[in-house]
Image (cartoon, rainbow, N blue to C red):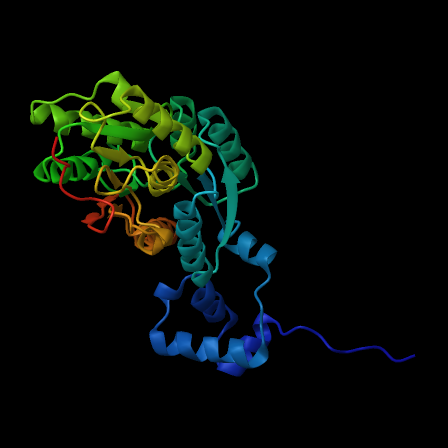
């Protein structure tokens, strides 16, 4: 009888081809910083030439790690999370790590359950969205000493790591811009702020900016809505129906994100409210559609891919031992002026 002698290349084959020891091959693949660049290049060339693929189980046993990193996000219905996750996964894959993804649907109890499930599957590190986690989850993570990073908010409590920006300050910049255009009746279509520190900070920022100008955000000018076009349109109807005609009607609406702003633009179009001549609208995130819409959306640009890539690099630094302590990184956001805002209409 004949048998197929074809087999997959082994680490020993790579070592022979590169003229190094198997220990050097292991270090070059798993701890590249510990190997001279020229030596690592020889190993990688042999890996490519032979088509060697490291065995995940053996690698995990040698490093006492799984080679996986967990991420919990609210949803991927919003493109801001989809783009961020793609950048995070790309950076982790380049370092040889697999990303396991879970969803919370903006529910802290679900977030805790998903995080515990990821840890039960042996993830080496964890990325979380924002700072609204339950104290019991944070205490549980600290007890285990797992590298954790919070993405999208800054600053974080002492001892926690984050990569994000000051949501409060960013929305203050939006309101001050509208005030400079002469707007005084400013409303807000916010995301649901319960269990969402980013949404809550943006609401607080609008209130603070208006208060500093001697103005207020009365209850009829604040509506919270889920991040869907349908909910956004319903929210705008509430804002406009509360004061359907000038001079009581708002002249500007600050939206908690671009999805809410798109819904606001659709509802204004349906009601025959001219944007920006009668009503200015501002979003937050700067999704791709924001610049393609007509009128193009004035919004806050968040460098999403950079933020999530930095978060991945932080976790990788903790895992390879080059960073021993939690680190907080602030990123800059900017207000992008487009066609959906103009000077306040005259009475």
- Give the quadrant of residue 8: bottom right
The answer to whether one can see residue 88 in this image is yes
Q: Considering the image in quadrants, where does the C terminus appear?
A: top left
Q: Nearer the viewer, residue 45 or 308?
A: 308
Q: Is residue 340 left or right of residue 109?
A: left
Q: Is residue 281 above or below residue 319?
A: above
- Give the quadrant of residue 212: top left
Image position, residue 4 (x, y; %): 80, 77
Going 58% across and 72% down the picture, which residue do you hit?
A: 52
Q: Nearer the viewer, residue 48 or 251?
A: 251
Q: Nearer the viewer, residue 249 or 171?
A: 249
Q: Is residue 99 left or right of residue 167?
A: right
- Give the quadrant of residue 248: top left
Q: Is residue 125 left or right of residue 283?
A: right
The answer to whether one can see residue 332 in this image is no
Q: Is residue 222 above or below residue 265?
A: above
Q: Is residue 75 left or right of residue 322?
A: right
Q: Nearer the viewer, residue 305 or 230?
A: 230
Going 30% across and 40% down the picture, which residue do you hit?
A: 161
Going 40% across and 58% down the picture, which residue do you hit?
A: 91
Image position, residue 30 (x, y; %): 45, 62
Q: Considering the image in quadrants, where does the N terminus appear?
A: bottom right
Q: Is residue 246 above or below residue 151?
A: above
């Amino acid at each position: 009888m004949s048998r197929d002698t074809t087999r997959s290349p082994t680490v020993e084959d790579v070592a022979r081809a590169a003229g190094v020891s198997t220990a050097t091959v292991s270090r070059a693949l798993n701890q590249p910083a510990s190997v001279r660049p020229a030596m690592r290049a020889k190993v990688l060339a042999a890996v490519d030439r032979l088509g060697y693929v490291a065995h995940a189980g053996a690698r995990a046993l040698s490093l006492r790690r799984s080679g996986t990193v967990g991420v919990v996000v609210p949803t991927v219905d919003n493109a801001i999370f989809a783009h961020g996750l793609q950048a995070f996964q790309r950076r982790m894959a380049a370092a040889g790590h697999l990303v396991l993804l879970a969803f919370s649907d903006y529910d802290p109890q679900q977030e805790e359950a998903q995080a515990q499930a990821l840890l039960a599957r042996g993830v080496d590190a964890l990325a979380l969205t924002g700072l609204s986690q339950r104290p019991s989850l944070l205490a549980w993570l600290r007890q285990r000493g797992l590298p954790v990073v919070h993405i999208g908010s800054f600053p974080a409590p002492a001892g926690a790591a984050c990569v994000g920006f000051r949501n409060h300050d960013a929305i203050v910049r939006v309101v001050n811009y509208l005030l400079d255009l002469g707007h005084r009746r400013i409303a807000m279509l916010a995301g649901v702020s319960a269990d969402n520190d980013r949404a809550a900070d943006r609401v607080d920022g609008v209130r603070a900016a208006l208060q500093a100008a001697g103005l207020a955000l009365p209850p009829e000018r604040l509506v919270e809505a889920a991040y869907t076009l349908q909910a956004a349109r319903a929210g705008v109807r509430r804002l406009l129906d509360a004061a359907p005609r000038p001079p009581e009607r708002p002249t500007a609406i600050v939206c908690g994100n671009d999805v809410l702003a798109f819904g606001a633009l659709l509802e204004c179009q349906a009601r025959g409210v001219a944007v920006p001549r009668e009503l200015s609208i501002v979003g937050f995130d700067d999704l791709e559609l924001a610049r393609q819409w007509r009128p193009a959306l004035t919004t806050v640009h968040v460098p999403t891919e950079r933020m999530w890539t930095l978060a991945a690099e932080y976790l990788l630094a903790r895992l390879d031992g080059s960073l021993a302590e939690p680190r907080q990184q602030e990123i800059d956001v900017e207000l992008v002026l487009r066609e959906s805002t103009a000077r306040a209409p005259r009475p």
